[in-house]
Amino acid sequence: MTSDDTKSKEELLQELNSLRQKAAETEGLRSRLGKIENLYGELERKFEKQSREYAQERSERDRTEEMLRMANVIIDKSPVILFRRLTGVESNLIYFSRNIARFGYTTDGLLEGTVDYKDIVHPDDLARFEQEIRDYAEKDVEEYTQIYRILTKSGQVRWIEDQTSVVRDANGIKTHTQGVIVDITERKASEDQLRKSEEKYRRIVETAGEGFVLIDKDLNITDTNQACCKMLGYSRDEIIGRRPSDLAADEFRQFLQIKREEILSTEYRKFEGVLAAKDGRFVPILVHANTLTDDRGAVIGHVGFVTDMTEHKKALELAGEVQKSLLPQKNLRFNGLDIAGRSIPCEEIGGDYFDYLLGEEYPDRPFSVVVGDIAGHGVDAALLMTSARAFLRMRSSQPGNISQIVNEMNRHLTRDVLDTGRFMTLLYMTIDTDNGHLRWVRAGHDPAIVYDPVQDKFEELKGVGLALGLDAKFTYEENVKTELTSGQIIAIGTDGIWESFNRDGEMYGKERFHSIIRKNANAEANDILNAIYSDLDSFRSGLKPDDDITLVVIRIT
């Protein structure tokens, strides 16, 4: 190799230029290498990003496929069949869920056209099915429901509910219709059975002799029958929409308003009332009603059967007149006694009783007064009262003191009522004005009251005694009070007086009873009697009494 010292200047310049050229080439290579490295890095980053995106897409695809698989499983087991079809295309089904197989058909068969859905529709329903679709399309209905029959592949008839909705694109153009198909065969069978049952009971209700009303939870009448219309003289349309209180007579309307909560609080109830007919007649009725509830126990309405009690009431009124004829018909004034009595039953006939025993039928016996109260009221109580009256009158006409009379009456009555649960309270009193003595037997009855206006003192004539009809072996004893004086007042009543209630639930009570006697102490017996009944009516403010009310007032003159 030639030494640099021996090279010429030209050779050295040429070598320098060569080195400079090589250096420039090296720098170019370095620059290219850097660019290549940068490009590689960029490609590597893009690859990593794409790998992550692919992994994410693959994960999402896997989840979507899993969800789709689960959806298909759910749909396969679901009673709901899904469908989707294009609009405006003859063979337009593009989707049918696989559970169409429950009817024996395949999704492929329907989508490929080897099975036409119209061929599945029952021939008797096909024309209606197609016409309904055309009508809905012409009216541009967005959602509609069709109910029709189809034939399964095996030939069975099934009822279908087809719920269809319209799908539109961004421009509002109809592109698809889609919806669900549900097999409602069992529901239709239940509905048909229910309809037949309703028709059966409708015929029963319509042909029933009793009135019938169906009332909603707001107490508006929603249905009634011919018997009810005939009873009141209204047409069905004139009754429906009204409230029961609109048809009630004034007193019964007040009863319904006052007792509303009490009546509605019981599931089953029975009560009487009076309705006002269209022609102005008043119709007495007996109501049997109960509350209707849904499966959760919520009140949905009420139903009532209404019996016309007109003829029954006429018979009871006649019986009541007969019963009244058995009671003393006039007040008495004799031998130093001023006597007035009255009995008012809470129904047409009652179980209260009072009687005066005097005259030739009862020789050698002082004047006697009897007040009794049969447990309960109504026909059975009235019959028992009549039987007790007959026996007492018969036995009192025979020898014996009043304790003997009551003891024998108890034995007789016990034999008659022992198995019925009935009993009778009684107060039997004799008044001997010649010697100023009172004698009485108290058989479970409220004590008689004696008022002395001179001393302004009330005394109760008590005494031990069980109600009649409970124990045949019970022995009743006679009680005695002496020193009767002029001006004293004796009052014998039944608990229907002091146990009467007003509209506020307050009881009349004996204190108020005493105050009326005190205020009228100088009046005649009949005036005292009238004052008590008048004050009792005022206290009740027209409210119907719950019990019979009987009172005898005796004033010593």
Image (cartoon, grey):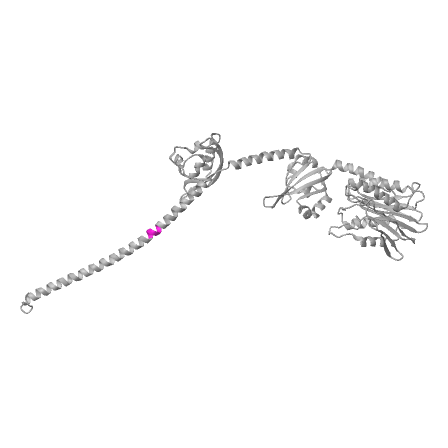
Above or below for 25 versus 228: below
Q: Main secondary structure of the magenta part?
A: helix
For residue 46, side relative to residue 148 (left or right): left
Quarter of the image with the N terminus is: bottom left
Q: Position of residue 363 (x, y in %)?
A: 94, 42
**Foreground: 189 or 36?**
189
For residue 260, side relative to residue 124 (left or right): right
The image quadrant of residue 10 is bottom left
Please say whether residue 289 is visible from this viewpoint. yes
In the image, which residues are magenta?
A: 53-57
Q: Residue furthest bottom?
A: 5
Above or below for 499 versus 391: below
Q: Position of residue 444 (x, y in %)?
A: 82, 48
Residue occupying image coordinates x 62% and y 35%: 201
**Foreground: 302 or 269?**
269
Residue 56 drawn in magenta: yes
Q: Residue furthest top?
A: 123
Residue 496 drawn in magenta: no
The image quadrant of residue 456 is bottom right
